Every structure is written in C-alpha cells, then in structure tokens.
Image (cartoon, rainbow, N blue to C red):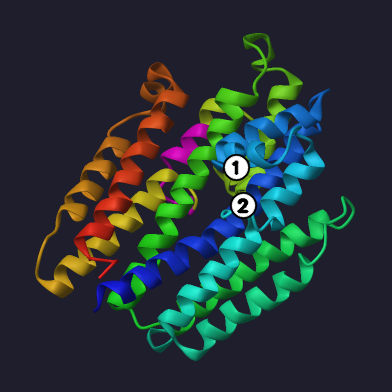
Amino acid sequence: MLGKTAGGLYWMSRYLERSENTARMIEAGQRIALTRSSSDEEWISILQAAGTLAGYNAKYDTITGDTAIDWMLRDPANASSVMSVVEMARNNAKLVRTALTREVWEAINECWMVLKDCLARKVSERDLPQVLSKVRQRAAFVRGAMHGTMLRNDIYDFARIGTFIERADNTSRILDVKYYVLLPTALSVGSSIDNVQWESILSSVSAEGGYRLTYGQKVLPHQISQFLILDKRMPRSLSFCIHKIRDNLEYLTQDYGTRLPSADMADALCRSVSERSIHDIFEMGLHEFIAGFLLDLSALGQQTELDYRFNE
C-alpha cells in the first residue's frame, strides 16, 4: 500500500474518533461544571485537557462555558473543533475513496452533511445534549459500516490503529481533567461532589453500565481508574486500546513480512501498562502516569507514520 493511502486511512479514523471524543469532553465538562460554584472557570481545565487552550486565548479575552463550547464544537479557527475534524476526516476519506466500501464512504459523507447542518449556527444550551448525541451517533454509524463491510486487511489495520491511538489519548485526558485539574482540594476527596464528578467521568466514556456490572453501585476512584486504565474488556480503557494497536501492528508485520520499530514500541507500551497494578499507578501519581502514557502514545503514533511513510 502507498504510504499516502495508509496515512489517509489512519488520519481519517483519528479525526472521526476525535469528533466523538471532543463531544464527550464537552459533555464531561458540562456535567462537572454543574457540581462547581464557578462553572465558567472549569472550562479552562477542559480546554487545557483538549489541547486547545492556547488557541482559544489567542482569540478570546475571557473564558466562559458558552464560548468554550462553541469553540470546541464549530469554530473554524480551532483545528480540533468537531466541525473542523469531521471535514478533515471527509477530505482524507476522499483521498482514499477507492480503499473504502461504498457503505463506509456514504456514512462519512452523511456524517459531514448532518453535522454541517447542525453546527451551521451557535448551539443553544437546550439543544446541546441532542447535538452532542448526534455527533456520537454519526461516528458510531461510520464504525458500524467499517466493522460490517471492510475486508480485514492492511486497509482495515491502518484505520483501526488511528482509531485506538486517538481513543486512548482521549480517555487519558478525560481522567486527567478529573483527577489532576478539576479536584479543588484534598478535602474534596470522597465527598459527594467528588463522587458526582467521578460518575460524570464514567458517563462521558459510556462506561456506567459496564462499571456497575463489574463493581456494583458504589463509586470508588481506585475502581473507576482500574476500569478505565487496566480493564481489557472495557472498549475505551487504555489497556484495551493499546492492545488493539499492538494487534493491528502485528497483523501488518505478518502481511508485509517486516517487523518495524512501531511494533516493538506498541509491545513495550502494552507491557508498561499491563505490568502495573492500580495501586502502583496511584503510588506514582495518576497525573504522572497519564502524562508519561501520553508521551509514549504520541511517540508511537509518530513512529508509525515514519515506519509506513505516510507522507510519501
């Protein structure tokens, strides 16, 4: 496969996943802000976690929830806004159109058309839940078309690698928002506010049902972190995502008959996550663990681009 085609599939999938993840980040921010007295200030944390705070500050003098949501949803100056990344996903899909099934292309194109209409104007607070749900729904339609119609070959592998690198990145950032940035003081740990915020994190990654099936009704930070970091059954956990990345890089190794550095890096990252207990992670500091994981994940993405010559 041409490197440019591989790169198009990889970034198409990353951008689609990012659209859904940005919607989830907005939802997490909105839920957590409801538990705080000065809710507008909490959007600093959300923008920081999303990696778009500097761009926002370059355009706006003050941070309010209303403006932050609009920036993350539809502002063309924000390259990571939902509308921006959906458009980039569609552009990449057009570049690799012959590698996609008709169903996948139609799902991506419809995603772009529906969201372009939804986000043509500023979204009101009343309509926001419905719009965020539609973003998640449209991303799920594309995933369903890929899962149901794509041949399991290198085309599928590059798309999956992009999806799970982006997803692992997002779950890490959502956890970091809660534990490191949003918790006001050590006195809040274990309080009703703390518990509501942890429940909001579960909700933002659609993990409430799975968590309760596994641990019951009691909300405990260690158990939630265990579930979202180490549980291989949870499709948005760090462990689940990195194992899927490793598996798809292994498939590429088998298909191409050459083992490249990215496969070894994915293997090492799997071990670094799997060999730790949640006690070990809290002992070193959840924020510190997440920061290190994000650096390793970014390095893995960059190495994958180099190994498979995405720019050639």
Residue at point 43%, 32% (across, down) = 290
Residue at point 46%, 25% (across, down) = 286
Tell me if mark 2 has few (under 14), some (14-19) or many (20+) residues whose alpha carbon lies within 10 angstroms of its own. Answer: some
Q: Which residues are magenta?
A: 224-235
Residue 215 seen in the figure: no
Q: Position of residue 92 (x, y in %)?
A: 46, 74
Question: Whole-Å distance between the Cαs marked 1 and 2?
Answer: 7 Å
Q: Position of residue 120 (x, y in %)?
A: 78, 67
Residue at point 63%, 55% (across, down) = 81
Residue 208 seen in the figure: yes
Q: Decide: marks 1, 2 in contact (CB < 8 A)?
A: yes
The image quadrant where one finds the N terminus is bottom left
The image quarter in which residue 144 lies: bottom right
Q: Position of residue 223 (x, y in %)?
A: 53, 31
Q: Which mark is residue 55?
A: 1
Is 290 drawn above or below residue 183 in the view shown? Answer: below
Q: Secondary structure at mark 2?
A: loop
Judging by the rendered image, the residue that carries numbered circle 2 is 78
